[in-house]
Amino acid sequence: MSELGEVSDRIRVAVVDDQELMRSALRMMVESQPDLELVGEAADGHAALALVRGRRVDVVLMDLRMPRLDGIQATEVITRELPTTRVLALTTFDLDEYAFPAIRAGASGFLLKDARAEEIVDAIRTVHAGHGVVAPSTTRRLIEHVAALPADTGARAAAVRAALTPRELDMLRELATGDTNAEIAQRLHLSENTVKTHVGHVLAKLGLRDRVQAVVLAYESGLVRRSHPRG
């Protein structure tokens, strides 16, 4: 439930897409779920900004390629102005040039439009709960992409180190593998609940929305390099 859950127990969803047919399909999908509520639609980024500024929106289903103001630019503004609103990016193209900028702009999720309705609905619930969702075909490429970027090993790395305990730093490095809590727990011989607790502390202390952002930060700060061992 969101912080404003006392107003409504349902997750308030906005649909943003320049194609009317796609908006219609997403609208019907949202309206078919008892725990979701459609609060509005928009056909471009400017209309999307007006929508989220005027109404409480928990999750935005955001098309990335739109006229006037694209979904990446709109996502950046939304996540900056309304940090409790989550953006789930949807695109026809499983390409790095769309996925990585969307995630950097603050999107909590990235899925292809041809994903099954059940996957999209589950992703809405997942990002609303504060977790990240990335199409499986994109996850490993995301790690490879950020691992290849020049690392800022100065003030940013120092700030991350200062914010976390040694155990939490280790957990950040584990998050950078892209593995699930269960996989990390098995590798470290810890309970899954213990890993979940440490992950929550890492995200909270670093002001990150989800573990996808943690992966990016781990590499960008130089705390993890491409050759970092996973074991």
Image (cartoon, grey):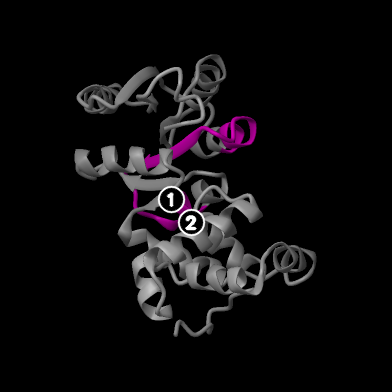
State yes or no: discs 2 and 1 in contact (Cβ < 8 Å): yes
Q: Which quarter of the figure has residue 65?
A: top left
In the rendered structure, does residue 77 fall within the stretch colored magenta? Answer: yes
User: Foreground residue, 91 or 110?
Assistant: 110
Q: Could you tell me which quadrant the C terminus lies in?
A: bottom left
Earlier sequence position, callout 2 versus callout 1: 1
Give the magenta part as a residue range.
Answer: 76-100
Q: Is residue 91 visible?
A: no
Residue 5 appears at what percent x and percent y? 45, 25
In the image, residue 10 sits, relative to residue 171, either above or below, namely above
Q: What separation in Å lies between label 2 and label 1 (alpha carbons)?
A: 6 Å
Residue position marked by numbered label 2 in the rendering:
212
Rendered location of residue 98, percent (x, y): 45, 49
Q: Amino acid at mark 1?
A: Gly
Tell me the number on the disc at residue 132. 1
Task: Look at the numbered disc 2 and give the secondary structure of its residue.
Answer: helix
